[in-house]
Amino acid sequence: MIRNSVALGHTRLSVIDTLTGWQPIANEDNSIFIILNGEIYNFKKLRAQLIHLGHEFNTASDAEVIVHAYEQYGLKFVEYLNGMFALAIWDEPNNRLVLARDRFGKKPLFYAFNGQKLSFASEVKTLIATGQVQRT
């Protein structure tokens, strides 16, 4: 996904919803995008709650549930997640990037900022490949 000055890429290990869960996943109007590394254990329960609140889903992916939780609860969405994860949400209307990981840090999330460009990844070697991080 490339929008203005934002690019999100994802290489995926399919755990849930192998046919329609390709990432990034967007909300209904393609204004909020997510990439997820990990698994949300309570995504079915959370999905049911969000459907009851009027949200519509296009996939059975746990990542899509997070997009809708973010729409519903704002930055408090992470309080509703039970799982092991590192994620990035690009909220285009608010020009906001949200990076988060589970409470225990089971999934790594590394980042580098050089004053102009922010890069993030689940592996340090990916940041090294951007040229923003030097091997030491």
Image (cartoon, helix red, strand yellow):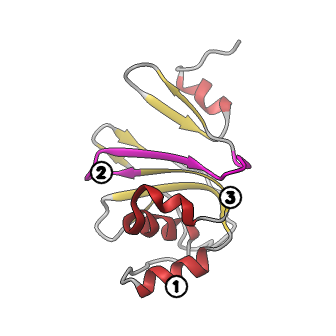
Q: Nearer the viewer, mark 3 or mark 1?
A: 1
For the C terminus, give its image quadrant. top right
Looking at numbered disc 3 in the image, what kind of residue is underneath it? Leu
Return the x and y of residue 34 as percentages of the image width and height: 47, 56
Residue 8 in sight: no
Residue sitting at x 52%, y 54%:
35
Q: Are marks 3 and 2 in contact (CB under 8 Å)?
A: no
Looking at numbered disc 1 in the image, what kind of residue is underneath it? Ala
Q: Nearer the viewer, mark 2 or mark 1?
A: 1
Between the residue at mark 2 and the residue at mark 1, the CA separation in whole angstroms equals 26 Å
Question: Mark 2 = which residue?
Answer: 92
Tell me the number on the disc at residue 13.
3
Q: Which residues are magenta?
A: 90-107
Above or below: residue 90 compared with residue 121: below
Find numbered disc 1 in the image and state the secondary structure of the residue it sits on: helix
Residue sitting at x 56%, y 72%:
61
Q: Mark 2 or mark 3, which is nearer the start of the sequence? A: 3
Residue sitting at x 61%, y 74%:
17
Q: Quadrant of residue 5?
A: top left
Tell me the number on the disc at residue 48.
1
Tell me the number on the disc at residue 10.
none
Q: Nearer the viewer, residue 17 or 106?
A: 106
